[in-house]
Image: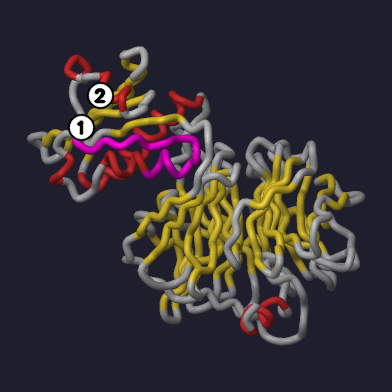
Amino acid sequence: MSSFWLALQHVMVIRMRNFLYCTGVLLLLWMSTSSQAALNIEIFGGGTNKIPIAIAPFNGERGLPQSISAIVSADLERTGLFKLVDTLGLTSQEPEQIRYIDWQGRGASALVVGSISPLPDGRIDVRFRLLDVVKQTQLTGFSGAVTTEQLRAFAHRIADIVYETLTGEPGAFSTRIAFVRKQGSQYALQVSDYDGFNARSLIEYTEPIISPAWSPDGSRIAYTSFEKKKPVVYVQTLATRERKAVANFKGSNSAPAWSPDGSKLAVVLTLHGGSQIYLINADGSGLQRISQSPGIDTEPSFSPDGRWLMFTSDRGGSPQIYRMPVSGGVAERMTFEGDYNVSPHYSPDGKRFVYIHRNAGRFNVAIQDLSTRQMQLLTDSNFDESPSFSPNNRMILYTTEIGGRGILSTVSSDGQAKSRLSQEAGNIREAVWGPLLKQR
């Protein structure tokens, strides 16, 4: 690793990505990035047993600032469950005009067609249909009137409907993510669409912001800020931007994680010396110590049923992942492959967890099945961080360092499809996936 990352490893326990202590100053240097940079989507990866689907260019979309069909295509391909069929030379048509034999000849089993029409009030009428090419019938359809600014959101909604119709599980394309970026001397906690578009800042400071965590209903974000020259945990309401310091105890306060019902937070404090895990109510009251370890315990993650806390600890001599009852007690070691496993995050269904595993000097996203204890590496890049599941269990969001800068990335939970949401310049860190929206 570079001297920068080696130095970063030896300072503090925030998020446990670089796990060890030394005396000195906390080096948290999330590099600069431009909030206006457009995202360039790169999707790569293979796999078998994908659903062959054709997404025809929508009639009338050519003059729009954003292509509805291109957004839907990128959404579906990124999951690793779909194979996009070539549509060159074929366009959207009404069902009665479609020559299904043409699409069958190209290997499609499902077809998405649509149309775009301007309305007198300045809005845009968007219509789409999902068709079964084999049975030559319509599976579902949807329409709505939107503004130009709402086109991306509507395209994600279409992708959600297609995904759910063909797989039987909800899509996660209308969800949001949060991440930290730094531009010049300014740190910003930002929220965006799941694919990184439409980012907006919740807070901006000249001191680091780390460890964002979504509340289960998506209305609040907990995070750690250094604006008071020490790490303090805040909870901020997105709708009003009101915020409250909920963990501002003596020493370090960091790594917040929400309980499944949103009533409590697990936080990491040095209140009584070493870094240990505590529970507090969401308003900051009711402090309760959970872990009792001579080592460093950090990065807690609640199980979806609220019974367990998974976390990172060096109590065995090297950073590994453990779990223990939320009420406290004996901790069970979960990782045994390698001498560096950190940043655990439960899957929403509670059957797996994702984490960072050091592999031949590289830091990669790994996943482990809780029933079989089998581990699978999902990435092969040099330095990955902060993995978290999509709320439908299908994809994993993380940041990876490419060319000395951090970028948003996703990988399907089977490792078959990887996607980089790269930016023209700058770095992003601390990405975390939000929950499904209430209307779903």
Q: Residue at x 26, y 35 (%)?
A: 87
Residue interval drawn in magenta: 74-89
Q: Is residue 170 left or right of residue 343?
A: left
**Front residue of this view, candidates 422 and 18:** 422
Q: Residue placed farthest to the left in the image?
A: 120
Helix, strand or loop at label 2? It is helix
- Residue where numbered disc 1 is placed: 90
**Front residue of this view, candidates 316 and 376:** 376
Query: CB of mark 2 within 8 Å of CB of mark 1?
Result: yes
Question: Neighbour class for label 2 at 10 Å: few (<14), some, many (≥20)?
Answer: few
Q: Position of residue 322 (x, y in %)?
A: 82, 53
Q: Is residue 140 above or below residue 187?
A: above
Q: Position of residue 429 (x, y in %)?
A: 53, 66
Q: Residue at x 79, y 68 (%)?
A: 275
Q: Is residue 134 above or below residue 108?
A: above
Q: Is residue 219 left or right of residue 348?
A: left
Asked if the stretch drawn in magenta spans residue 81, the answer is yes
Question: Neighbour class for label 1 at 10 Å: few (<14), some, many (≥20)?
Answer: some
Asked if the stretch drawn in magenta spans residue 396, the answer is no
Labels 2 and 1: the sequence-earlier one: 1
Name the residue type under label 1.
Answer: Leu
Q: Position of residue 124 (x, y in %)?
A: 17, 37
- Residue where numbered disc 2 is placed: 102
**Rendered image quadrant of residue 160:** top left
Q: Residue at x 19, y 50 (%)?
A: 65
**Front residue of this view, candidates 97 and 175:** 97
Nearer the viewer's eye, disc 2 or disc 1? 2
Name the residue type under label 2.
Answer: Asp
